[in-house]
Image: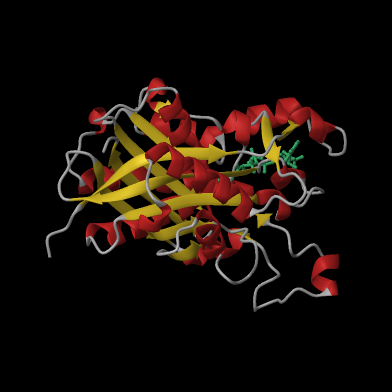
Amino acid sequence: MELRKVVVLGSARYVPERIMTNHDFEKFLDTTDEWIVQRTGIRERHFRAEGECASSMAITVGKKLLAQTGVDPKDIGLVILPTVTPDYMYPPTAVIVAAKLGCVNASGWDIEGACAGFIDGLYTAWSALATGDVKYVLLIGSEIMTMTADYTDRATCVLFGDASAGVLLKSVDESEYGVEGIYLGSDGTHWKSLYQPAGGCVKPTSHETIEKGEHFMKMEGQSVFKQAVKTMVTSIERVLEKTDTPIEDIDYFIGHQANARIIESTRRKLKIPEEKMYVNIDRYGNTTSATIPLCIDELREAGKLKPGTQLVLFTFGAGFVWGGAHLVWGS
Ligand code: UT7
């Protein structure tokens, strides 16, 4: 079968209005603005308003994407929603989003890829679009990370924020633009380094799990940090090997925003010039599957993405899972 190209038609983002600064944390937690900035690069993040959820934020992003690209919602064949904070355990939040957007001919599913969710979703969208079976895909990462953070655990709660962001992808006959290649990896032996102990079938939610705070995220920060740098470097190298592209040809590197020091170590190891590594963690914190499309959308809005601009997306997260994507902007 002749495979088709998959291009990005547009990008959009939504962040809740409420800003939570590092100084706000100083009021109830044994922490300081100085520690958080030095150790993570984060200055502020956004917290949801009451009632905001993964679907409501994704619907806002979806409406923006449809308006920006002029695509008829009836032509969307798939809505893919990477999230670890779905509206409900089931049904998939993606079908709620599809219905509210009028995507009546679309299937919809969630991807529980944690911080790798966006690139996992891109891989899935790419596969579906490359066959031509589907013409348009909405891919939107949407995370209410504040519901999984423990606000008595200073080592994790300061890191995360809420946000949603995504792209609209199209299948085309031929193009010099679009997805060039994707590399994905995982090592599940580390699953306990970053996880939520209760709420799944191993430990269903009970009075006891709630009393013990097992419905909150647990993380071994340092081991996660080391693996993140190692696998992010590998992800960039592997995807560029796959697409046979010299690293110097890439205009922007857009990494998962978990910690500014992780991104900086990755940049140094690969000798990437500072101006090519996009960082916005200072304003949003870690928004899991939304971090990469948040960066993409800021770059697009700033007029930095021109037809032919070469991007490498790279990520790492709970599992561990990691990956990289090589994408040429334009449609
Ligand atoms: O997106 C998914 C992937 N997630 C990540 O990639 C996160 C990876 N890990 C990290 O980003 C870092 O490990 C953290 C930011 C979580 C922690 O930074 P660190 O430099 O590794 O600190 P640490 O865990 O080694 O802790 C150093 C000290 C400890 O105090 P003692 O034991 O030395 O007295 C911590 O208790 O810093 C303390 N600490 C804090 N102090 C002030 C931890 N959190 C805080 C805090 N404020 N918020």
Q: Which colour assignment does the render follow?
A: secondary structure
Q: Quadrant of residue 158?
A: top right
Residue 313 seen in this snapshot? yes
Residue 283, percent from left and from top: 62, 30
Residue 253, percent from left and from top: 38, 33
Residue 293, percent from left and from top: 46, 41
Residue 186 versus residue 244 in the image, above or below:
below
Residue 102 versus residue 68 in the image, above or below:
below
* Camera-side residue of 248 and 121: 121
The quadrant the N terminus occupies is bottom left
Residue 290, percent from left and from top: 53, 45
* Camera-side residue of 189 and 111: 111
Image point (41%, 48%), residue name: 231
Q: How many marks?
A: 0
Residue 234 seen in this snapshot? no
Q: Name the quadrant where ligand 1 sits.
A: top right
Image point (60%, 48%), residue name: 57
In the image, taking residue 260 as reference, residue 16 lies left or right, namely right
Q: Residue furthest left?
A: 2
Image point (43%, 52%), residue name: 139
Image point (26%, 38%), residue name: 331
Q: Quadrant of residue 307?
A: top left
* Camera-side residue of 14 and 111: 14
